[in-house]
Structures are given as structure tokens and as C-alpha cells.
Amino acid sequence: IARDASELLGEPEWIASSCNQLGNLLVAENQITEAATQYERALAVIGERSPLRRAVSLYNLGYCRVALGSARDGLRLLL
């Protein structure tokens, strides 16, 4: 609901935040591939607008990549 409302309002930071939170919920449900997709979407939307939001999404995506077996790529994002 929050992501849909954010998209209707066209607020990139809100959209990115919603995607990141959805990714967190998916990780908690062990749906890692789907979570990674949400983090990638957050990164695409936020671009360079908010360095902090970008860093959080990159970290979360790195976790997913490690969990999915792409350790080198994931660690690059985590560090």
C-alpha cells in the first residue's frame, strides 16, 4: 500500500524506502531472490538523490547476493 501511494505521488525517496522495507520483509520470509529485486528497484529509483538510502539498499542487496551464493559480488556491495 505504501509503495503504491508513493508511486502515485511520484516521490522517489518514498518509493525507494518502500521497496527497501518490502525487501526487508521478504528477507525475513526467506524470499531472498524477490528481496534482491526490491533492493535493485530501490536503487534504480533513488539514483544519486540520497546517499544514505542508496548505501542502505546497497548493503541489503549485498547481503542477498551473498545469501544467493554470489559472495564476491555481495561482499563488494557490503564493503
Image: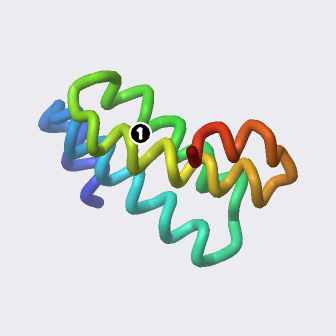
Mark 1 closeness class: few <14, some 14–19, many ≥20 residues within 10 Å: many
Secondary structure type for disc 1? helix
Q: Nearer the viewer, residue 30 or 68?
A: 68
Residue farthest right in this picture: 69
- Seen in the picture, residue 11 relative to 69 is either above or below; the reply is above
What residue is rendered at 57% in x and 66% in y? Answer: 26
Q: Which x, y percent locates residue 59?
A: 51, 50
Q: Nearer the viewer, residue 17 or 59?
A: 59
Locate the N terminus and report the quarter of the image it occupies: bottom left
- Seen in the picture, residue 30 relative to 69 is either above or below; the reply is below
Q: Which x, y percent locates residue 5?
A: 20, 49
What residue is rendered at 39% in x and 42% in y? Answer: 55
Residue farthest bottom in this picture: 28
Pointer 1: what residue? 42
Q: Which x, y percent locates residue 68?
A: 81, 54
- Compared across the picture, whether 43 is left or right of 27 comes to left
